[in-house]
Amino acid sequence: MDVAKWGLVVAILALGATIFGGLASLFSGTFDRNFGLRINEFYKDWRRKTRTVQSRIDWLFAAVYGFISLAVIILGIWWYFFDRTSNNPTKEDTNIVTKEKPGGDVVSIKCPTSNAAQKEDGDTNWSRAFRMPSSETRAVSELKIAAGNGDPDAQDTLGIMYALGKDVDRDKETALWWLQRAAQQGYANGQVNLGLIYEGIPQKSNESIAAYRSAALQNNPRGQFHLGRVLSNQHHHVEDVKWLRKAADQGDTEAMYALGFQYYFGWGVARDMNMAIDWFRKAADRGRADAQNMLGGMYEKGDGVLADRSEAMRWYRRAADQGHEDAQTNLARMYEEGRGEQSFAEAVTWYRKAAAQGYAEAEYALGLMYEGGRGVTQDRELAVTWYCKAAEQHYRHAEEALVRLQKQNR
């Protein structure tokens, strides 16, 4: 019951207490068979022009009780019907996870404010595609001088720095300006990076393809991969395979991984699980974490290969050791379920690593471990904390867990 409802209850109780208390004081605290006669006498006393001292005291008590009763009733009604916002915590203080029950009522549970870092926005995810030249050690001031003198490599590097906010204030417009300067000189890496920025601008999608194509025609593997990727997204499943294969043949692991999916789903080629596994393995052997995670899933489920839990765990671990949050969660789940080797402690370790990266599935799973006391000391408060973190990302199972706990607390 919330505070507003308590206000109404207090008002009702005060009204009852006032009526009985006031009458008790007016009639000398006696409620007997002459009760009706006493009321009649009190009424007559009210009609008199002159009253006794006792009657004046009785009237004073009646006025005080009446005033208190009226004030409490008004306060309770106002509190219940009008001042409901004071009971709602602000977003700065807390998060409320709500879910509608079949009957229409809404139940809620208060989630503690998270101190975790904010999730990355779309621009940050977009900037991950840039690659800072590893050999670039020049200071920003030197780069600006070189870029101003027309050095395309310096222009490209400076554009990436502004896109990423590396050693300079992040500025997408300035990044775009420098990358355009590099691309106009036919610098392939600049054309690729310009295409990446254009992809984030809806009205420039065609220009992004043109930029990638210019780089691809110079046999730039990154340009070939991104051109193939965009064409695949647009369902041009013939030309996309051609460009992805060109990039893969030059050792681009992103292209190898993408080609694996082309064969896995039969996009632009005949569906061929052996070819899919071959390309996934080529990328995985070269350290591509998402390819390693993909192979782990295929071996776990027996998808295109003979099921092999040990092999699945080996690939999951290779990706997990690189910080791949989905692989960390998959590895933890296998430890939890005993699919190969059971260890709740190991499961918690890997769930925690993935949850530390804000991976909602791992946050929810860690909540389950704390709620059930598996691999950790049972702690419902920590369970709620992890459920809340996952629910903040609208992870359905976490929202349902919070509703379940709310019902149990009633």
Image (tube, rainbow, N blue to C red):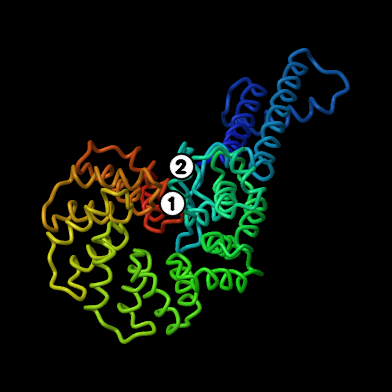
Spatial separation of the CA atoms under disc 2 and disc 1: 9 Å
Q: Quadrant of residue 79?
A: top right
Looking at the picture, tell me which residue is in the foreground, 288 or 10.
288
Callout 2: SS:
strand
Q: Which residue is under mark 2?
A: 111
Q: How many marks?
A: 2
The residue positioned 69% from the left and 26% from the top of the image is 65
Image disc number at residue 96: none
Q: Which of the 4 image quarters holds residue 72?
A: top right
Please report contact status of discs 2 and 1: CB closer than 8 Å, yes or no: yes
Q: Amino acid at mark 2?
A: Cys
Q: Tag 1's secondary structure?
A: helix
Whether 126 is drawn above or below 2: the answer is: below
Local crowd size for mark 1, using a 10 Å CA cut-off: few (<14), some (14–19), many (≥20):
many
Residue for point 58% across, 34% down = 10
Q: Residue furthest right?
A: 49
Q: Position of residue 1 (x, y in %)?
A: 50, 41
Query: In the rendered view of the protein, which quadrant contains the C terminus?
Result: top left
**Left or right: 339 in relation to 400:** left
Q: What residue sits right under mark 1 in the picture?
A: 391
- Residue 93 in the image: x percent, y percent? 55, 36
**In x, y percent, where is residue 402?**
39, 49
Would residue 355 be found to the left or right of residue 45 on screen? left
For the residue carrying disc 2, how many other residues have a C-alpha within 10 Å: few (<14), some (14-19), or many (20+)? many
Name the residue at 41% across, 50% down: 390
